[in-house]
Amino acid sequence: MIKKIFILLAVPLFLLIIPQKLMAASISLSDPSSDILSEVNQEFEITVNLSINAADGTKYYLRSVFFKSGTNRYCGYTWSGQNWYNGPFSSNDGWKNLPSIIISSDSAQTRVKSKLDPLDNDCNSSGEYFFKVERYTQGGSGSFDDQNEQKIIVDIKAPTITVKPTLIKTPTATSGFKSKSDPIIVAPSITVSPTLAVIVINSSSISSILSSEFAISDSITASADVDLSTVAGLAGRRIGNLTYLTLIIGISLIFAAAFWSFKKINNFRN
């Protein structure tokens, strides 16, 4: 009776253990490209050797994950052979975006490539990380087999910010002087130099003076016309300098006084 009870208990236990032993899998990780990552986008490669009791031709998908010690917050990208992928994995056939391996003689080997995720707060800071591989079946069931997890040091240097000074031109006092780009207007300079005429009168030349009275008068009139035309020319040039006009009037008065003196002398002789 006791023997029958033992058999009844042993058979179910045997049936539970044998399938697990037959389906037991393990992963061996080797030949990492580096054990230090100094950039958040630096690629990490490693060889994966899967040992599993499965029929030849069975396909599995492999996901690379980074995580910090004592946590199960997995992160990172896995290279599928065509693009980088970081999920979803268990829905919408997401696991099929991962690199695959085909079992032959209960094993398969491949080299996977992965990198950190700079947008994931669990995966973008410096510190000590661990790396391992998750295996997905063709139906989308994922599991972490026994494996030798890899320790990786992430040492991301903080970016250096360089401030470049900007030169700003500020206006400066010019003390009334115009800049080189401004046109400089120079007024024409006119200098009037009056000439003092010295007239010598004697008895022998009085007759000639009298005979040239009208010629002198015409000359004075012509000179006045020239001076008036000069004044008109100056006004046309917009000089607007009253000093020049005063000098011209003074010269005219000198000629008028000379003419008046000739008249007086003529009247005195007569």
Image (cartoon, helix red, strand yellow):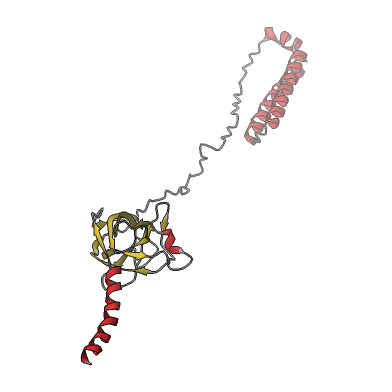
Can you name the residue that lies furthest to the left here?
Answer: 2
Q: Quadrant of residue 183?
A: top right
The residue positioned farthest toward the bottom in the image shown: 1
Q: Is 146 placed above or below 10 here?
A: above
Question: Is residue 160 in sight in this rendering?
Answer: no
Residue 249 at x, y percent in the picture? 68, 30
Q: Residue 101, can we see it?
A: yes
Quadrant in which the C terminus is drawn: top right
- How many badges with numbers are in the image? 0
Is the residue 239 above or below the residue 154 in the image? above
210 relative position to 139: left or right: right
Where is residue 66 drawn, in percent x and y? 31, 64
Tell me which residue sits at (75%, 20%) in the image: 221
Q: Residue drawn at (46%, 49%), measured in percent from left and top?
A: 170
- Where is residue 246 drawn, in percent x and y? 65, 33
The vertical placement of 197 against 64, above or below, is above
Foreground residue among 142 and 64: 142
**Residue at (75%, 13%) from the top-left corner?**
215
Q: Quadrant of residue 182?
A: top right
Of 222 and 260, the residue lying toward us: 222
102 vs 114, nearest the viewer: 102
Q: Is residue 59 left or right of residue 21?
A: right
Q: Position of residue 23 (x, y in %)?
A: 30, 68
Quadrant of the rendering where the N terminus is positioned:
bottom left
Which image quadrant is residue 197 in? top right
Q: Nearer the viewer, residue 111 or 2?
A: 2
